[in-house]
Image (cartoon, grey):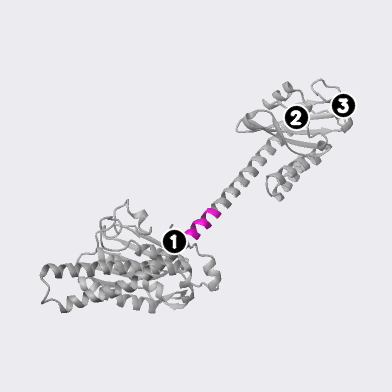
Amino acid sequence: MRRQIIQEIARSVVAAGGVDNVIRALVESTARGTGAEGCSLFTVGPGGEGVEHRLSCGVGEKGAAADRLLAPEAMRQVLKGKSLLIWEAQRDPRITSREELAKAGISSIIYLPFRNHEQVRGVMCLFFSHKRRFDREELDFLDSLAEMAGMILEMAETRDSLARDAEEARRDLARAMDERRHFLSFLSMVAHDLKSPLVAVQGYLKMILRKGSDSLDERMMTGVKRSIHRIDGMMELISDLLELSRIESGQVVAEFKAVSWEEVLSAAVEMAHELAEPKGIVVLTEIRRPLPEVFASDIRLQQLILNLVSNSVRYTPRGGRITIRAMREGDAVRVSVEDEGTGIAPDKLPHVFEEFYKGDPEATEGTGLGLSICKRIVDMHRGEISIESPVPRTGKGTLVSFTIPVGVTCSLEEKWMSIPHASGV
């Protein structure tokens, strides 16, 4: 019988949603299971003083003021954690409104406190229309029911609190993402407006450099070269900002199709040689064939590899080596770019995928967006990216690896809706 009572309470509570529904399920199933004509549940008020009626059922609805039916001193004893059985409620001096109980047809009442972390959290009150006696075993069981009710109530309140926090966090994230999209849209507009005049100035300076060597002294030539170099840096930043805006606005999704890794790697390696050649850096490849097709953007995968190679070229000394590896790994393709460069300090590693982050704030090279864009591209393909420095095998340089899953068959719209657009923010 007792097992059935517990099972009924458990079933009712599991089916309920929200604190109020859980409380209703508790009082109704407890009343049915114990044979009580009604049940009320109270929680301790703010500051631990008094109790607050939460819900009643059956004749308990008429006895919703059960906290006020009991003399203050008796209620204080209950709130200290002592169960109280009032066998003849209509005659007991501890009941202050015996006439009210008589009208409700209540003969016996039992007050069952329940605890939370050794403190009384509330009281469950059972009403009986007949004079009800309990032996010690029955009282212990009722105490256990009350304690169980307390734990269930606490879990329900915690669940509701977490749900509210999660909903608030979701709204905050949505607002942040919306603000971010507006910010990136603004940056994109500014970058686009700057691009045309900068291209014109850059072209003019390069023409001066080509044709004005006879009329310009060495100091002027140095100034022109420095200006061209700075404009190159600004053009790189503009290009990265426009690219970031395109990725986060979803424009890149239209490029997704069945892609051959062989073709992606072939094109990327060819361009990697062009990037590395001016510094005398050797680009090596270790590709384990065959490699499967993947549903992806071939342009972005090439860009991803070239961004990593470009970083490696920037920090690898003249005559060094960069190795591009690719292999199938379970349901994904793993690609890595390893260099013999200066490496990255351990305290810098956690931040390398953040936007505008530079390991050396004084460095003039790079925009601080390259690795951030790499992470966006990998996220867009539902992959993972990681970085190690120094390389465990050699004790020097940097190793960046990423995986792209294969066999993705979802539609473009479904794919884009599932992407965490604000990843890494």
Q: Quadrant of residue 64?
A: top right
Circle 2 SS class: helix
Magenta stretch? 171-179
- For label 3, the residue is 99
Counting residues from the N terminus, which is met first, the one under dot 2 or under dot 1? 2
Was residue 176 drawn as part of the magenta stretch in this picture? yes
- For label 1, the residue is 183
Task: Using the image, determine if residue 201 lies above or below residue 67.
Answer: below
Q: Nearer the viewer, residue 264 or 6?
A: 264
Q: Residue at x 33, y 74 (%)?
A: 196
Amino acid type for the residue under numbered disc 1: Phe
Mark 2 vs mark 3, CA separation in Å: 15 Å
Foreground tag (2 vs 1): 1
Task: From the top left corner, tell me how far across and down residue 333 is, in percent.
Answer: 42, 70
Task: From the top left corner, tell me how far across and down residue 120 is, in percent.
Answer: 65, 30
Give the quadrant of the N terminus: top right
Task: Using the image, determine if residue 147 lies above or below residue 296.
Answer: above
Circle 1 SS class: helix
Task: From the top left corner, tell me how far across and down residue 170 is, in percent.
Answer: 55, 54
Was residue 358 drawn as part of the magenta stretch in this picture? no
Mark 2 vs mark 1, CA separation in Å: 57 Å
